């Protein structure tokens, strides 16, 4: 029945939009979370315009066929995992951008990559701040759907802080415009924000109006190594109590060594932790901030501390931090955590993760957007070793339980997707879960949008 319905959809769309080649379908089954429970979709649909997305959703609603929205598939929580007999709606061909330097906004289609948005707006002397480590490979639509964070978010906020307006296609095919190029606008409920971070469960984002900033001033960078992770984590609180760094990142020994194995840049392999901090305050203030951070690191027990006002030199350390996930991934399969805590609990979280690693006898590398209290414990395991894989899975859950017990969150930026869904109720509680379900069923009564994710 679904296959004959698909012929009807293909007839309504331009040639080539509906793809059923089995090899291509296979490449759209999973995102970077590589969820083993991924299904095989009936088709991948790659529209170019909002009207085509409307056609797809009208058809899916009429035929009760699941739709999994997909950007670039770099998600780490299984949010874009395909379901059997559903379709994957990929936005990769929706790539227009119009920059308006007068209002300092850009109207962007969802398939453009984050790096391409940054580049296009830079041509007008403007800056789009959110910078997930994956910025060269992830789409702006995926960033909106996950409310992506990144390295400069400690000072500049996350994706939602730059979303002024959206066009969203709802489950029944209705296209809605929300917000627009206005810096202040409180008319009606905050519906724009409702869709940011909704992980494809409430609608498909087909256009976004982004707020842009003047270019970022050059940064002064401070790099420090420590012989204890707690000392490094402790320094974070002292710094954020006094100044607003533009970056405050943490890497543990496993991450340092994994990056050094690949990049050979002379990182101290014997260090237990490394902090990469920066200030982009204008004029002499940047240098003062850097001096202050170097002093805090030294007083916290840094074994080495190095400062530079040369942006290229600083960028090399930032690149090392960005490279940490792929570098650790080279050591084995990863279960990638994304837990966050209020800043005073950061050292307890890092210490608690080390205990879980010891108890479960698995390697867990911790990297963190430390200034946001958002950590990424990377659980390394060998999928061929069933006992180890089971211990790794146990550790994955225990880390989320630990974060919640410290007043934290199961996800700071990657989203709940499918992998973290079983832990969501434990954080939100029954009332917030019920409210979430009511919103979902009001917007998607037949449950066709990204079934199995989040809710
Ligand atoms: C090496 C590496 C580093 C990373 N670093 C970071 C980081 O620093 N910060 C961070 O936040 N993330 C990071 N990520 C995770 C990932 O890149 C982000 O979650 C990103 O926002 C996903 O974008 P995407 O285009 O790949 O979306 P996808 O993976 O394709 O989809 C993600 C979710 O969004 C939904 N979706 C996608 N497009 C739309 C749309 N147009 N409308 C509605 N729903 C949609 C999907 O259904 C899914 O639920 C990293 C990933 C990797 C591989």
Image (spheres, rainbow, N blue to C red):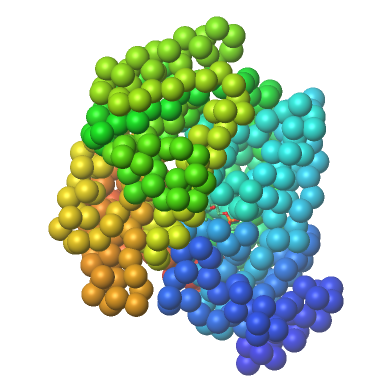
Name the one closer to the observer, 196 or 239.
239
Q: Position of residue 422 (x, y in %)?
A: 31, 64
The residue depicted at 34 percent of the width and 77 percent of the height is 384
Farthest top residue? 284
Q: Position of residue 158 (x, y in %)?
A: 51, 37
Residue 50 visible in the picture: no
Is 140 on the left-hand or right-hand side of 222? right
The quarter of the rendered structure image containing the C terminus is: bottom left
Farthest left residue? 359
Location of residue 413 with respect to 59 vertically, above or below = above
Residue 172 location, quadrant: bottom right
Assign ligand 1 to one image quadrant: bottom right
Q: Position of residue 388 (x, y in %)?
A: 26, 70
Location of residue 246 with respect to 141 vertically, above or below = above
The residue depicted at 72 percent of the width and 79 percent of the height is 19
Instruction: Give the number of callouts.
Output: 0
Residue 37 visible in the picture: yes
Is 450 on the left-hand or right-hand side of 257? right
Q: Position of residue 108 (x, y in %)?
A: 73, 46
Residue 267 location, quadrant: top left
Residue 62 location, quadrant: bottom right
The residue depicted at 75 percent of the width and 57 percent of the height is 94
The quarter of the rendered structure image containing the N terminus is: bottom right
Location of residue 187 with respect to 82 vertically, above or below = above
The residue depicted at 45 percent of the width and 60 percent of the height is 330
Location of residue 367 with respect to 170 vertically, above or below = above
């Amino acid at each position: 029945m679904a296959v004959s319905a698909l012929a009807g959809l293909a007839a309504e769309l331009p040639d080539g939009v509906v793809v059923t080649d089995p090899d291509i379908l296979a490449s759209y089954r999973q995102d970077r979370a590589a969820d083993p429970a991924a299904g095989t979709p009936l088709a991948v649909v790659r529209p170019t315009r909002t009207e085509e997305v409307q056609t797809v959703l009208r058809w899916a609603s009429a035929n009760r066929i699941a739709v999994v929205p997909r950007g670039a598939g770099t998600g780490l929580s299984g949010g874009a995992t395909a379901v059997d007999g559903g379709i994957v709606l990929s936005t990769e061909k929706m790539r227009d951008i119009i920059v308006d330097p007068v209002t300092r906004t850009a109207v962007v289609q969802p398939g453009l990559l984050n790096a391409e948005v940054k580049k296009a707006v830079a041509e007008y002397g403007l800056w789009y701040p959110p910078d997930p480590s994956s910025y060269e490979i992830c789409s702006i639509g995926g960033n909106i759907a996950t409310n992506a964070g990144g390295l400069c978010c400690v000072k500049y906020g996350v994706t939602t802080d730059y979303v002024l307006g959206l066009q969203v296609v709802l489950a029944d095919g209705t296209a809605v415009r929300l917000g627009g190029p206005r810096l202040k606008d409180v008319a009606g409920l905050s519906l724009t924000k409702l869709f940011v971070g909704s992980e494809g469960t409430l609608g498909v984002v087909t256009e976004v109006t982004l707020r842009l900033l003047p270019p970022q001033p050059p940064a002064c960078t401070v790099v420090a190594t420590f012989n204890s992770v707690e000392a490094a984590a402790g320094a974070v609180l002292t710094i954020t109590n006094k100044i607003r760094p533009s970056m405050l990142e943490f890497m543990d020994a496993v991450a340092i060594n994994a990056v050094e194995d690949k990049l050979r840049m002379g990182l101290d392999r014997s260090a237990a932790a490394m902090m990469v901090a920066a200030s982009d305050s204008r004029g002499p203030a940047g240098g003062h901030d850097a001096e202050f951070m170097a002093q805090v690191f030294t007083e916290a027990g840094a074994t080495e501390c190095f400062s530079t006002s040369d942006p290229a030199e600083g960028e090399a350390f930032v690149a090392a931090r960005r490279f940490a996930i792929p570098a650790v991934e080279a050591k084995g399969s990863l279960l990638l955590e994304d837990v966050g805590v209020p800043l005073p609990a950061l050292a307890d979280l890092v210490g608690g993760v080390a205990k879980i690693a010891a108890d479960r006898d698995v390697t867990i590398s911790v990297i963190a957007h430390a200034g946001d209290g958002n950590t990424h414990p990377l659980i390394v395991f060998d999928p061929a070793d069933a006992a180890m894989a089971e211990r790794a899975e146990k550790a994955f859950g225990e880390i989320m339980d630990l974060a919640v017990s410290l007043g934290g969150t199961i996800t700071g930026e990657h989203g709940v997707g499918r992998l973290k869904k079983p832990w969501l109720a434990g954080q939100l509680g029954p009332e917030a879960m019920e409210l979430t379900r009511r919103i979902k069923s009001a917007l998607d009564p037949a449950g066709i949008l990204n079934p199995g994710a989040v809710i």
